[in-house]
Image: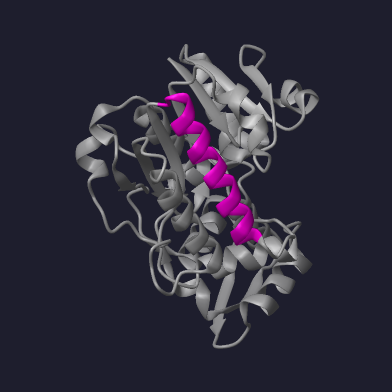
């Protein structure tokens, strides 16, 4: 079985590539730079040079591929036309998959993306799933919220805020609930979905066992780090102002922080529980995920 990973040099993509290679999969990764790909991806992974915005470069990457894993999204881009960029990439991938006889597309989307009040980035991720389904190739769409792991942007934002601010005046969005998932569990869901007959054509919400607010997550991270923190909510600070605040006290860029905050202004909790029937494993708790993330950072 040959698996093509799109977004292989990203946070989830790099880890999934190593996981699949270790599990014995025949893995191909589409990369814009072969030099960068060789530097950060396993030597046993086949690399194919191409640009997702140039559909003519996709055919060689899709040749002979059984399953495509789509891990591409525009969060963090400085280009204001991110919706059109997402649309163009998804359309090109859908056409390439259909033309090359791909058997399955596994897509990592976002929880809350189908809500009318979802952020523009989450709505775009929902649209990507719809476009991929026009390929007539069966799509398995896994929808996740906050991914917790060493190096993940969402976790880094929380950790840096907790580490640097003993007293925090936070906006109202820190009280909105989300359902975080450990990176190892996200990889487990993705791996088990590849070629999984019971999940073909399904849209599945994935998350850990805990439903928490961002305030709850900050408190838990502080406890694990043995820090005492005081957090007070105020009914001010727009996402734009909040992003400047995050940018001031953490290494997270203001535009990326704003997108993260926009995404959590509305609840991102699993509404579909089919994952419990389809996947026979127990995801770790948020506290366990934090302990694992911090241990991996120290290592």
Instruction: Give the colour scheme shown.
Output: one colour
User: Considering the image in quadrants, where does the N terminus appear?
Assistant: top left
Above or below — where is 249 with respect to 132? below
Which residue is drawn at the image coordinates 61% and 31% (left, top)?
Answer: 58
Q: Nearer the viewer, residue 268 or 100?
A: 100
Q: Where is residue 133 drawn, in percent x and y?
A: 38, 45
Which residue is drawn at the image coordinates 58% and 20% (left, top)?
Answer: 28
Q: Residue 100 colored magenta?
A: yes
Q: Where is residue 144 drawn, in percent x and y?
A: 43, 50
User: Considering the image in quadrants, where does the C terminus appear?
Assistant: top right
Above or below — where is 6 with respect to 234? above
Which residue is drawn at the image coordinates 67% and 13% (left, top)?
Answer: 43
Q: Nearer the viewer, residue 127 or 288?
A: 127
Q: Residue 201 colored magenta?
A: no
Above or below — where is 48 with respect to 249? above
Which residue is drawn at the image coordinates 49% and 72% (left, top)?
Answer: 265
Q: Report whether 111 appears left or right of 253.
A: left
Q: Report whether 22 appears left or right of 199.
A: right
| Residue 194 occupies quadrant | top left
Q: From this viewpoint, is residue 144 visible?
A: no
Q: Nearer the viewer, residue 30 or 92?
A: 92
Q: Where is residue 118 drawn, in percent x and y?
A: 46, 69
Q: From this viewpoint, is residue 71 visible?
A: yes
Q: Residue furthest bottom?
A: 235
Q: Report whether 229 appears left or right of 201.
A: right
| Residue 8 occupies quadrant | top right
Please state the extent of the stretch shown in magenta in the rendering. 82-102
Secondary structure, magenta segment, majority class? helix
């Amino acid at each position: 079985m040959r698996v093509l990973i799109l977004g292989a040099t990203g946070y989830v993509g790099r880890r999934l590539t190593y996981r699949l290679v270790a599990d014995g999969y025949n893995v191909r990764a589409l990369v814009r730079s072969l030099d960068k790909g060789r530097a950060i991806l396993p030597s046993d992974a086949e690399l194919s040079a191409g640009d997702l915005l140039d559909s003519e470069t996709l055919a060689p990457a899709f040749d002979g591929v059984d399953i495509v894993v789509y891990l591409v999204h525009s969060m963090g881009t400085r280009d204001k036309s991110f919706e059109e960029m997402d649309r163009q990439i998804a359309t090109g991938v859908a056409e390439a998959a259909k033309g090359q006889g791909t058997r399955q597309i596994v897509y990592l989307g976002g929880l809350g993306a189908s809500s009318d009040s979802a952020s523009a980035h989450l709505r775009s991720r929902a649209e990507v799933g719809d476009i991929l389904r026009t390929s007539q190739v069966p799509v398995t769409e896994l929808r996740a919220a906050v991914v917790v792991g060493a190096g993940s942007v969402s976790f880094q934002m929380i950790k840096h805020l907790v580490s640097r601010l003993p007293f925090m005046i936070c906006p109202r969005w820190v009280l909105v609930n989300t359902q975080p998932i450990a990176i190892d569990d996200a990889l487990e869901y993705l791996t088990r979905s590849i070629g999984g007959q019971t999940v073909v054509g399904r849209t599945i919400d994935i998350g850990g066992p805990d439903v928490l607010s961002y305030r709850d997550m900050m408190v838990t991270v502080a406890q694990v780090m043995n820090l005492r923190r005081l957090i007070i909510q105020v009914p001010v600070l727009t996402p734009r102002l909040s992003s400047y605040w995050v940018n001031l006290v953490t290494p997270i860029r203001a535009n990326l922080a704003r997108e993260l905050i926009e995404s959590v202004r509305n609840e991102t909790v699993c509404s579909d529980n089919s994952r419990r029937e389809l996947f026979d494993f127990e995801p770790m708790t948020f506290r366990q995920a934090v302990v694992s993330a911090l241990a991996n950072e120290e290592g």
